Image (cartoon, rainbow, N blue to C red):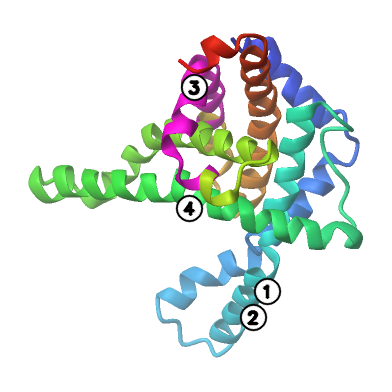
Amino acid sequence: MIQFDEIRRGFAQIAADRNAFWKVLLGGFLLINPFLLAFAPAFFSGSDNPLVAPVFFAALGFNILSFWFPLGYTYEVLRRARFGTAPQLPDWSFGVLGRYAQEGAVKLLIAVFTLILPVGIWMGLCHLLFISVLGLPPALLSLFLPPAMLFVIPFCGVGCCRWLDGASPLDCALNYGENFRLFRKAWKSYLIASTFLTGLNSITTAFFYTIPFAAVFGLCLVDTWFGPVYAATRQDESLDPVRARK
């Protein structure tokens, strides 16, 4: 079971990289362009400023092309944590952008079915029950998001780890039974790490403009924790094949 000193070790591994700040900064800029965040409120409020729409769509177009790279970058972080190879944070270079884009597409596919879709269903049910039926203010709907994220973050992480072990992207995304079986083997460890990450994200995203950078840092951190947990469950299965089938 994951201990709090292992969580601290995850922070230490990232902080040991003297370029960690700049790597996360670049990843956040590519994931969600800060200019997109800056102009989005004015764009959706119907601002009369003639510069708002062109800048917003330019930033959006840039993001459509760039957000694959940080997703693939965090997949490389997960790979290194899963197999215990190389420094925890990889470097950014033009030579790896193609691979990052491909692996980012795989991670997005897995996340759609193991994270985004379950959260969407959960929030829809919460809206139906608490807002439509019980009459709570719509502004309170965001309070129901953290419990869902607590469970789907490690569930998505298991699916991503399975792809590193050779499973197909669709199997990792849609084989809920296998994902849950592996999640259940170390559910306490996953949930402790996920609880810590959920709280951390609540703090680091509170200033709105920090959202993209907090997201990349959080993904790198959680992959640093989940990789060894998943590796330990797989090692246990190889040592005890009969128990693994249960």
Which secondary structure type mostly characterizes the magenta part of the structure?
Answer: helix
Q: Which residues are magenta?
A: 172-198
Q: Earlier in the sequence, mark 2 or mark 3?
A: 2
10 Å crowding of disc 1: few (<14), some (14-19), many (20+): some
Which residue appears at 70% of the width and 15% of the height? 6
Which residue, given by chain and number where applicable, does mark 2 sit on? Answer: 58
> Which numbered marker is on residue 112?
4
Q: Secondary structure at mark 4?
A: helix
Structural distance between the alpha carbons of marks 1 and 4: 21 Å
Which residue appears at 21% of the width and 49% of the height? 127
Q: Amino acid at mark 1?
A: Phe
Q: Disc 4 vs disc 3: which is toward the camera?
A: 4
Q: Amino acid at mark 2?
A: Ala
Question: Do callouts 1 and 2 mark residues in contact (Cβ within 8 Å)?
Answer: yes
Q: Earlier in the sequence, mark 1 or mark 4?
A: 1
Q: Disc 2 vs disc 3: which is toward the camera?
A: 3
Which residue, given by chain and number where applicable, does mark 3 sit on? Answer: 191
